[in-house]
Amino acid sequence: MRILIYAMGSAGDVHPFTGVGRALQARGHEVFIITSAFFEELVRRAGLGFRAMGTVADFERVQGDPHLWHPTKAFPSIIRNAVNPSYEMILGVAKELHQPGNTVIVASSLAWGALGAAELLGVPVVSVHLAPALFVSSHRQPVLHGAPVPQSAPRWLKAFQWWAASKMVNHHVLPEWNRFRKLHGLPPAKGMLKEWHAPARVIALFPDWFAAPQPDWPAQTRLTGFPMFDEAGLRELPGGLEEFLDAGEPPVVFTPGSAMDRGNVFFTEAAEALRLLGKRGIFLSRFPDTIPANLPTTIRHYSFIPLSRVLPRSAALVYHGGVGTCAQALQAGIPHLVQSMAHDQLDNLSRVRDLGVGDGLHPRQFKAKRIAAMLERLLGDAEVKRRATEIAGRFRAAEWVEETCRLVEEMAPGK
């Protein structure tokens, strides 16, 4: 079977789909990852077919938008700069690679153009969502920036909130989406909060103990688990890492996310927090100009390390709240300190708190003294350590990926 995987977003979005693609290929399928040209080297190194959606310059332009990390301006920025230009590119690749009767499309959360391509070509399509924030609910609702209704509110008030939110989403999405649909003879979409889920199958790449399915989630949703692909085995570890890890107590790892090119304050405050604590640290960022000059020998900067190779030997992780990074820390069994900024990050922090394995700070609170105080509390809390170890024991990564593959294979034409 030929499987077309459309993965839109940063490395945190592309990594999981690359991992699923490798697993599907190992089961005998022909797999193409369709994503930004920025990730071509990664996809080809993983041994998968590749088609580009936009140029490296396009990716860097989206990444460079200061609104990308704003709690309320991020969504319209992504729609305007990334999603709207993708529709024709997605359809073009689908027409090129489609094999009638032998093709399945797998679409990430923002790859709505893949849903249109599937309609036009008569191809089965699977929506795959990485985080529970993509599922609105009037029961256990996602915790989102700008959503004022609390978790304790009555269901009718939560439902009203999502009705209002759908109006906002439709305002930003439907004009261009329906222009594309009309151009290709498709009926207009009416409500994206429901219609961004494929009608036959939705796969949630997280386990039910991280986010239990709610009664009002789409009935076609199936949960599997975190895919955990992070390029381990595909990249050599940076020089000096093993020696640094062996030279003292486990470090605290800091990363604001792979696409964060404005992490100067994050790392400046992190360095001072480590000084106050007397702890060692590792800073992860592919933007060297965000790292303070003249770091002490107790702190090392690396552009990239597969988290599965460093977190099990670390004391804690301080990060932005991305769901893939969160999963790596959960598997490592270490405490989390989350500085959530936008997107699904605030909701992922709420899940970390529910699990009892960490806490978070608002960006305005992310100052050295508060970071140091929170890390000291988390590292000294025996119950946090116990919960983190217990959660790590729940991981069944190989089983989760196998189940994800099986659910995709069930959508094969003729089944």
Image (spheres, grey):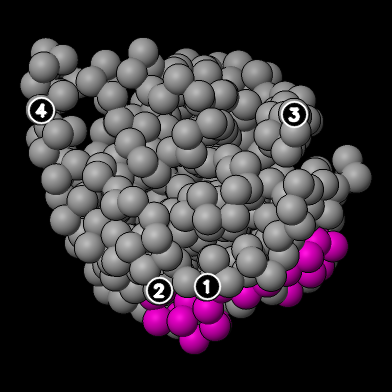
Nearer to us in this view, 163 or 119: 119
Crowd rating for badge 2 (residues with CA inside 10 Å; few <14, some 14–19, many 20+): some
Inter-mark Cα distance, 2 to 4: 31 Å
Disc 4 designates what residue? Answer: 160
Q: Residue at x 80, y 61 (%)?
A: 48
Determine contact: label 2, label 4, CB under 8 Å. Answer: no
Q: Residue at x 10, y 27 (%)?
A: 160
In-image side of 332 versus 286 (left or right): right
Nearest to the eye among marks 1 and 3: give it: 3
Inter-mark Cα distance, 1 to 2: 8 Å
Residue 59 lies in the magenta-colored region: yes
Nearest to the eye among marks 1 and 4: give it: 1
Which sits earlier in the primary sequence, circle 2 or circle 4?
2
Label 2 element class: loop
Inter-mark Cα distance, 4 to 3: 39 Å
Disc 2 designates what residue? Answer: 85
Q: Which quarter of the figure has residue 143? A: top left
Question: Which mark is drawn over residue 415?
Answer: 3
What segment is highlighted magenta in the picture?
41-63
Q: Position of residue 400 (x, y in %)?
A: 70, 28
Q: Residue at x 51, y 50 (%)?
A: 119
Query: What's the residue type where badge 4 is placed?
Result: Phe
Disc 1 designates what residue? Answer: 89
Query: What's the residue type where badge 1 is placed?
Result: Met
